[in-house]
Image (cartoon, rainbow, N blue to C red):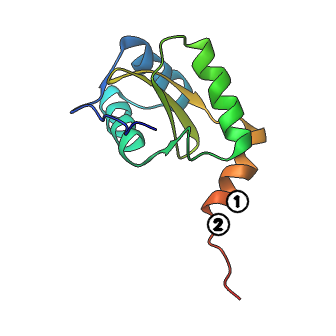
Amino acid sequence: MPAEIMPAEIHLTRHAIKRARERCGWTASAALRMARKAYEHGLSLVAAPEEIRHYLEGRERAHNSADESRVYGQHIYIIEGGKCITILHLPKHCQPALDRLRRPRRTA
């Protein structure tokens, strides 16, 4: 599997800024800061649990040209060629899988 090439910087489209304002209540600068964090530290499609992976694969198909999706916090960031093209809420049916992934494992 080829290594992921990370762009030097993430930019937001006007659509992403509009959706961040509508869906998250963020300003453009907050949306940009969160998109950068999501790209650097977010959960990629490869590392996601099955429930989230299936949902993300469907969203990437809906956004035909999307290179990558990232999950960070309770949001999904659709990224194409160094540009965040939209921000979505993570659906409720995917939340338990994300919680299981975040929960520390018990050692016996």
The residue under label 1 is 100
Q: Kindly identify which residue carries mark 2.
A: 103
Residue drawn at point x = 55 percent, y = 13 percent: 63
The kind of residue tagged 2 is Arg
In the image: residue 40, left or right of residue 64: left
Q: Quadrant of the C terminus?
A: bottom right
Nearer to me, 21 or 83: 83
Where residue 38 sits in the image (x, y, percent)? 42, 41
From what the image shows, is residue 43 above or below residue 15?
below
The image shows residue 15, relative to residue 6, as above or below, that is above
Q: CA distance from mark 2 to mark 1?
A: 5 Å
Query: What residue is rendered at 61% in x and 61% in y?
Result: 102
Q: Quadrant of residue 82?
A: top left
Q: x, y (%) of residue 33?
A: 32, 38
Task: Check disc 1 and report its element: helix, strand or loop.
Answer: helix
Residues tagged 2 and 1 counted as in contact (Cβ below 8 A): yes
Q: Count neighbours of disc 2 (C-alpha within 10 A) and say few if under 14, some if 14 to 19, many if 20 or more.
A: few
Q: Position of residue 97 (x, y in %)?
A: 72, 51
